[in-house]
Amino acid sequence: QIFFQSQLDFIYFFYGLAFVFLGMICFLLKRQYKFGPPWRWLGWFGVLHGLNEWADMVNLIIIYQDWYAIFRLLLLIVSFGCLLEFARQDFNNRKIFRVGMWVYTLIALILFFVWWNYGLPEVNIFVRYILGVGGAFGAALAFVRFSSLSREYKIKFYIGAGAFCFYGLSQFLIPSGQIPFIELTNQAAFFDYFGFPIQLVRAFLAVCISICIWQHYQWVVFKEFKEQQIVRRKTIGNQ
């Protein structure tokens, strides 16, 4: 425990780096796909959530005032909002039924109610419960659908879906708050019981998701290159 406690800043750094890398890969995939999965929103989630983890890292080193806590909370809300939007748009692409923008109005009302009755720390908790858990499980469902579209990387998308499921479950482990029974699932209790921080687990899951998407991106680029080679050979043959 003493070792991990002294290395928390490095854990947060690599945790954030894994998500930023995830975001960069998703933006590259967006350039390859003019249509298809909403990779842009997953990319923005990766970049913003990585920045949020780096902001938490800075908070470990330097104690800031209330405005910095609000800044970190806004980063968390926007990043998880992008993850939920990724899941929402992919779900709407299935054309079973559409989930409208009204869902964000409902979430905003819930968060306002929590802030009014409890305060900012409890808003952080409910952001994780609603946006974090909901977005992660929605992204897992999206990856399951992607597995049916890419036979070559079916297993890897299943691994990515599993990683998102575990990431969603990890959001139930939250900072301490004033809501009754919340101390049963806080991060400090996890650290005391297992001897390592939950951020280390989340970083590992982020790496798994990044590797899954990176390998899919490599396959997309290779497939496009192979198709260009075939077209070029046909063109030379016709000449």
Image (cartoon, rainbow, N blue to C red):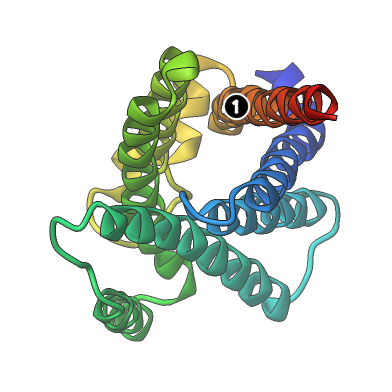
Who's the residue at 75% across and 39% down the image?
21
Quadrant (top left, top right, bottom left, bottom right) of the N terminus: top right
Residue sticking out furthest to the front: 239
113 is higher (above) or lower (below) than 195 = below
Residue 172 shows in the view:
no
Amino acid type of the residue that numbered disc 1 sits on in the rendered structure: His
- In the rendered structure, the answer to whether residue 79 lies left or right of residue 131 reads right
86 is higher (above) or lower (below) than 26 = below
Q: Which residue is mark 1?
A: 216
SS state under label 1: helix
Residue 227 pos. (x, y %): 68, 28
Corner quadrant of residue 45:
bottom right
Q: How many marks?
A: 1
Quadrant (top left, top right, bottom left, bottom right) of the C terminus: top right
Who's the residue at 22% across and 68% down the image?
99
In the image, 177 versus 144, the foreground residue is: 144
